[in-house]
Image (cartoon, rainbow, N blue to C red):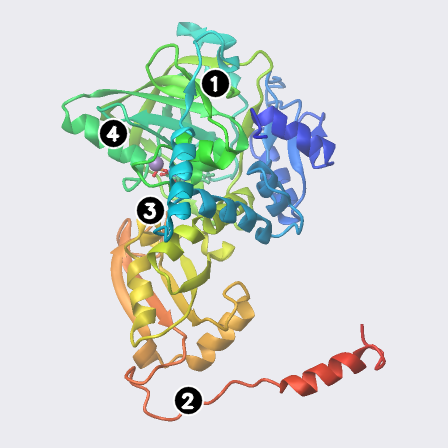
Amino acid sequence: MAFKDLREFLGLLEKKGQLKRIPAPVDPRLEIGEIADRVSKRIGPALLFENPTDRETGRKYEIPVLINAMGSYERMAWALGVDGDTGTWRDLDAKARELMELLPLDMPASMKDKLGTLVSLKDLADSGPKEIKQGKAPCQEVVWRGDEVDLSRLPVLTTWPGDGGPFVTLPLVVTSDPKNRLNVGMYRLQVFDRNTTGLHIHEHHDGARNLRAWSEAGVQRVPVSAALGADPATIFSATAPVPPMIDEYMFSGVLRGESVEVVKCVTNDLLVPAHAEIVLEGWCDLGETQWEGPFGDHTGYYSLADDFPVFHVETITMRHDAIYPTTIVGPPPMEDCYLGKATERLFLPVIRALMPEVIDYDLPLEGVFHNCAIFQIKKRFAGQAFRVMNFAWSMGQMMFTKFVIVVDEDVDCHDYSQVAWRCFNNVDPSRDILVSKGPLDRLDHSSNYESFGFKMGIDATRPLPGEGHEREWPESLEMSADVKARINEMWGELGFD
Ligand SMILES: Cc1cc2nc3c(=O)[nH]c(=O)nc-3n(C[C@H](O)[C@H](O)[C@H](O)COP(=O)(O)O)c2cc1C
Ligand SMILES: [Mn+2]
């Protein structure tokens, strides 16, 4: 059974001893961030700050703060409804296998398979969001309108000392296009004053495409809503690179095996998760921007300040006993790493469907997902590693990848020591490096240009004939099987574990 909402997930965490309640007064300005950072670095529990308090004024917030809810592989697996048996990212593969069965990625060979595919498509169609009646949704139990709207009543965190202000860091920002196609994406909101925030949508993301579509249709004032807290699969879906033609509620419905319940906002027509904790409803004027940032970001550096759209918050709705969910990003590992790893695992079947030579891939946490991808491939023809690089650079949000490393099928792409060993020893820089150019993630600070720059592919595979290596290629070392077996038998007797 899927989690109905965030608090049902918290119930599970509490039962498993993975939710730490903190009754002491702690300041959302820097203090909660520092605690969450330390706890993240030791892969600690989810934290519920029950008494967030402004240290300077002594003012207590009415709403508790939740942070680090998905801050481990185990909790990330639970969030997606799979067991966290191993406590490693491998637990997430169970979900990938489930999706593989559901999504008809392979052409069915037999009639039976064809029927199977039809069933899958029906499952898919049934996964769309289910709208419930306004007034019945928990997220609309309390409504703040007009002068009641005051974002300073929410315990919004300032996480790093150089930040431009407090930022809402875990919002599910809902936009639509003029044809009423919805998108849910996670974009931070810098609180400017009691009823406006920044809207930090990167130009390549679907949310930004929606805003541009309104602009092209000649509409200036565009509805925007941001839901804080939802069932964990829906929170994850807002961060995942879901293709633009699929709305994230549908994707979450597939993950959950159950439709997401949504409700129409009170002051605009956008649909938000009915079981959200808090909803900010409002609009953006596409002609208006404001200076946003800097913000201590998931690269471990401050992303630079720049002009971004302004989100006017007209109405705030919430539950009676709302929780304010948030996250901190910074030098890895942090909570977003597990969200990113879940994306890596769940999209492996899609990547394999498009590039069958790919056996597996890995996005190292240190590359913060858009900076490095390692592909493990079964190479059959000359230049195949370069095909993989070029494909990666053309695929969805993977187009941002700065370093693509390709290794042979016998190298475990998740074992960075093995990958480094092959790279350092196999690569002839004059032959195996491809420097290319293309879009970079907006957060990249190394390039001289914004969102654009150079990339490097490293082919660490063994060269095939015709790939420009004329000399003999040596075998790598491996003990013969009979000796291994003999030593295995003797191992215990020799006094080893
Ligand atoms: C914690 C967190 C914060 C994020 N903040 C932003 C942000 O401020 N702006 C942005 O464009 N993307 C941000 N992202 C990445 C997007 O949410 C992600 O790329 C998503 O797939 C975009 O969805 P879309 O293509 O449907 O717009 C963030 C991701 C996470 C996990
Ligand atoms: Mn999208």
Residue at image mark 3: 442
Q: Does any atom of ligand 1 lie closer than 8 Å to the CB of label 4?
A: no
Q: Does any atom of ligand 1 lie closer than 8 Å to the CB of label 2?
A: no
Residue at image mark 4: 211
Q: Sort mark 2 into few (<14), some (14-19) or many (20+) by Cα contacts within 10 Å.
A: few
Q: Amino acid at mark 3?
A: Arg
For the residues marked 4 and 1, what is the alpha-carbon distance in whole angstroms?
A: 24 Å
Q: Sort mark 4 into few (<14), some (14-19) or many (20+) by Cα contacts within 10 Å.
A: many
Q: Which mark, by number, is residue 274?
A: 1
Residue 336, given in percent of the width and then of the height, sits at: 51, 43
Q: Earlier in the sequence, mark 2 or mark 3?
A: 3
Does residue 264 lie above or below 27 as drawn?
above
Q: Earlier in the sequence, mark 4 or mark 3?
A: 4
Residue at image mark 2: 473
Residue at disc 2, secondary structure:
loop
Q: Sort mark 3 into few (<14), some (14-19) or many (20+) by Cα contacts within 10 Å.
A: some
Nearest the eye: 26 or 126 = 126
Q: Amino acid at mark 4?
A: Leu
Residue 403, given in percent of the width and then of the height, sits at: 38, 62
Q: Are marks 4 and 1 in contact (CB under 8 Å)?
A: no
Q: Residue at x 33, y 76 (%)?
A: 432
Q: Is residue 450 left or right of residue 66?
A: left
Q: Does any atom of ligand 2 lie closer than 8 Å to the CB of label 1?
A: no
Quarter of the rendering occupied by the C terminus: bottom right
Residue at disc 1, secondary structure:
loop
Whether residue 185 is visible: no
